[in-house]
Amino acid sequence: MAGDMDLTVRLTEAPGAPEYVFRLVFRGGARGQTAALEGSTLPDPGAALTAVERFGEEAFFLPRRADMMCTQQYGGPQVAVVTGTFHGRPVHSRFSLTDGCEIARWRSLAPLLGGTAGSTGQT
């Protein structure tokens, strides 16, 4: 683990629907220590931590390339906004299911954001 993180996820399943708020907190220590995830409110903070460690850098900080081709498919009205810190860097990222690229981005962090049909958090 490169460092601490404290991420807040604000999830809405449809326009005008209630907002759900979850937190992923990791404070040093060994990855398997429950105390390291104390304060997390996600259903499976261990799986969320694994996904964020694997895909967080790309999902939070790399902009979509202008020449990237994305399938024109709609995955649903869900929107998630993630704020906080990831290894000391500020995060403010918006996730949606508006096209194939955004669906893939959401699926990579499914344990953090909430699954989509057929998602496993693997890409």
Image: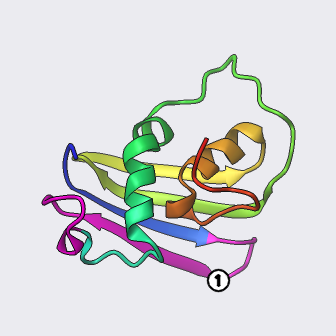
Left or right, residue 22 beside residue 70: left
* Position of 100 relative to 94 (above/below): above
Place of residue 59 in the rendered image (x, y in percent of width and height, measured from the top left): 50, 41
Residue 23, by quadrant, is: bottom left
Camera-side residue of 21 and 15? 21
Residue at (78, 42) in percent of width and height = 99
- Residue type at mark 1 is Pro
Q: Is residue 105 left or right of residue 86?
A: right
Identify the residue at the far front of this view. Answer: 32
- The magenta span reads 12-36
Q: Residue at the location (48% across, 31% down)?
A: 62
Residue 26 lies within the magenta run: yes
Residue 73 among those drawn in magenta: no
Q: Residues within 10 Å of mark 1 (few under 14, many from 20)?
A: few
Q: Position of residue 100 (x, y in %)?
A: 76, 40
Disc 1: which residue:
18
Q: Is residue 33 left or right of residue 50?
A: left
